Image (cartoon, rainbow, N blue to C red):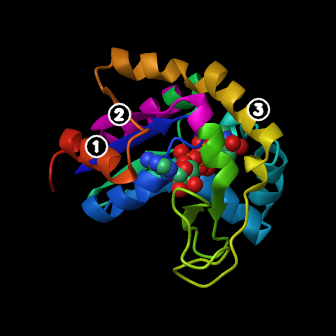
Amino acid sequence: MINLLIMGKPGAGKGTQSTKLLKHYQLTHISTGNIYRDEIKKGSAIGIEAKKYLDQGNLVPDKMTNDIVWEILKQKNYPDGFMLDGYPRTRTQAEALDQMLARLNIGLTAVINVEVKDEVLLHRMAGRRVCPNCGHTYHTENHPPKLEGVCDHCGQGLIQRPDDLEESVMNRLAIYNEKTKPLLDYYSEKGLLTVIDGEQSTNKVFQDIIKILGEK
Ligand code: AP5
């Protein structure tokens, strides 16, 4: 069983690596960003509330996010383990996660930080295109779809995320530096953190992560 936490600045490649890791290790994906985007798509009460924060690149309040993660974790529906992606993002969330895991009597196997310089991130987010139907992610230059603007997997037209527009991206990076970056020390002190060079090819990043977690 692997209970993994993947961290990194916005656009570092967490989602890209998650897709590969979930398949390799059969992990249950817990991505708070994906959960919020799905709720927005459904037009649910959570989605309507979350949209106010996501579009500007701000963090959704801790209590709402912690409650969502607890609802998932407490069901214990992750036979081979789980992968947390985009959570926790604040000290309050990290402490809440510790309490949840203690209540369930489980621990984190590893925390991986995918490290990428800001100028590389800005280029990645400017070129990112996503499928609003199946969630696959592309990049106009690094990872283009076979047919421009169309998802390879389901044929839906690709879109740019509203929070990938420049103003939101700058805000997300500033929030990351203030609220999320300190968590690297938090997990380093617990002896759980490994830093991976996220500027390598997606396959090389994946191989480096597997070296840490071990072959299945
Ligand atoms: P979330 O969805 O978690 O967004 P994020 O952390 O900003 O991360 P991204 O999805 O932007 O990037 P990524 O690291 O997954 O990169 P990707 O693989 O797509 O959160 C969104 C929002 O939800 C938050 O701003 C907040 O409002 C809210 N939220 C979520 N969790 C919350 C929480 N815990 N508390 C409060 N609010 C919360 O890659 C990016 C691009 O680069 C792609 O185009 C990809 O093709 C390309 N790429 C990836 N890897 C490589 C590589 N190695 N080489 C070249 N290109 C690459």
Q: Which residue is mark 3?
A: 171
Look at the picture and state if 3 lies above or below 43: above
Q: Is residue 106 magenta?
A: yes
The stretch in magenta equals 95-120
Amino acid carrying mark 3 in the image: Asn
> Residue 99 placed where, x, y %?
45, 31
Q: Viewed as shown, does residue 51 lie left or right of 100?
A: right
For mark 2, does the 10 Å Cα neighbourhood hold few (<14), some (14 to 19), or many (20 or more) residues? some
Which quadrant would residue 190 be assigned to in this image? top left
Residues at circles 1 and 3 in contact by the CB criterion of under 8 Å: no
Look at the picture and state if 2 lies above or below 103: below
Mark 3 element type:
helix
Amino acid carrying mark 2 in the image: Ile
Of the numbered discs 1 and 3, the one sitting upstream in the chain is 3
> Residue 48 placed where, x, y %?
83, 57
Q: Is residue 134 magenta?
A: no
